[in-house]
Image: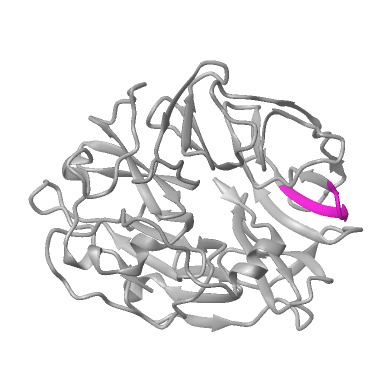
Amino acid sequence: MRRFFLLPLLLFALASCNESGLGIFYSISREDPLEDTTLPNDLSVSGMVKSSETYYVCAGGLYSRDISDGELAPWNPLEMPSNEYDLCLALLEFKGSFYGFFSNTAADSTQIFTSEKENIAWSAVGVFDSPIVGLAASESSLFVTERVDPVTYRTTASADGIDFSTTLALNPPNGVLVTDAVDFPIGTTWLIGGPYLYSGSGTTYTQITPPGSQTNASFGGLYVSDDLGPRLFVSDSAGHVYATADGSTWESATVTDDAGNPVVLYDMEEVSILDAQVVVVGAKNGYYDIVFEDGTYSSAFSLQIPGSEAAGAYSSSDANFLNIDLRRSAIRMFFFDGAGTTLFAGTSGNGLWVNPISGTTAGNLTRKWDRQ
């Protein structure tokens, strides 16, 4: 999944405090000291990519770190693509190149820039008549949303990252602010924006309503698991995760907090742990595990608190976990480096966290979260 972030929301988040909630993060079963590297701890992370040698993070500013230096090495601040822009609001990879959404603090000047992965040199792409408010991508298309007027959005798509002449016809008539996009299956793209979920291609998209979805709930994220089907997962702000193998038959699970209130859910990612596929779901109060043992999809899936007995050997909890801010943070995005088996969590106002995964048995599984 590759997403953008709503410009006004992120500008607010960059200056806001942490969101609070129930503690639901997990760490290793050993008591190791919490590490903390050079990134500011109050960052709102809105994008992360990697080249063959370097990680790049978008969090208001731009930052980089050599992968070979290790998880606790310092990060380096980078210059913006142009002196006109002082905020990075989204960063993603599309068809082998990096794309970033940049703005000035007043949000009256915005632009999309692109660069090769292995040789960072930014150049502007696309000509947009109205302020840009977001950037998202599936494997096949790059999507840019503009705010035409206070109540109207226009989303254009590009198959090559250069030509943005294709305007999507999305109902309602005022358009929607597209926040995430995935391809599922081949030839079909799924989009979300607020309370709207769409499936289609080209300029034609049909609104989809999973059974049991609530009209006042906003969709939080899209994720396609090739290992579990393939299967499409969709999260929302009413605590639901929906799953489908064909786009028409849906299963779902719901999670609530200790007071019985639905948990706002965001981004999703998948990691392989021991003999299981684990879909991690970002939330207003940390994240949840969906564990598929033996790597097999089950329609009776459920969201579990990391470290709980229900989550089993695939997550654990100790003093390190119970005393860190991460469990009270809103995780808006994940980034998984499969080559390094390292999971990153980007929070709203509480910085970037890293979770290296190692071990081959339940006895030596290591999942310690550290702040970057």
- Highlighted magenta segment, given as a residue range: 143-153
Compared to residue 113, the image places residue 259 above or below, namely above
Left or right of residue 335: residue 72 = left
Q: Position of residue 91 (x, y in %)?
A: 61, 62
- At horizontal 54% and vertical 83% (from top left) the residue drawn is 77
Answer with the quarter of the image where residue 124 lies. Answer: bottom right
Answer with the quarter of the image where residue 176 lies. Answer: top right
Answer with the quarter of the image where residue 146 lies. Answer: bottom right
Q: Total of numbered circles in the picture?
A: 0
The quarter of the rendered structure image containing the N terminus is: top right
Compared to residue 285, the image places residue 56 above or below, namely below
Left or right of residue 332: residue 148 = right
- Name the image colouring: one colour
Residue at the front extreme of this rendering: 259
Residue at the left extreme of this rendering: 363
- At horizontal 23% and vertical 57% (from top left) the residue drawn is 367
Q: Is residue 6 visible?
A: yes
Q: Position of residue 348 (x, y in %)?
A: 51, 64
Q: Position of residue 240 (x, y in %)?
A: 47, 35
Q: Position of residue 318 (x, y in %)?
A: 16, 61
Q: Is residue 100 visible?
A: no
- At horizontal 45% and vertical 50% (from top left) the residue drawn is 283
Left or right of residue 306: residue 43 = right
Compared to residue 184, the image places residue 56 above or below, namely below
Residue at the top extreme of this rendering: 249
The quarter of the rendered structure image containing the C terminus is: bottom left
Q: Is residue 348 magenta?
A: no
Q: Is residue 147 magenta?
A: yes
How would you classify the magenta stretch by its main secondary structure? strand
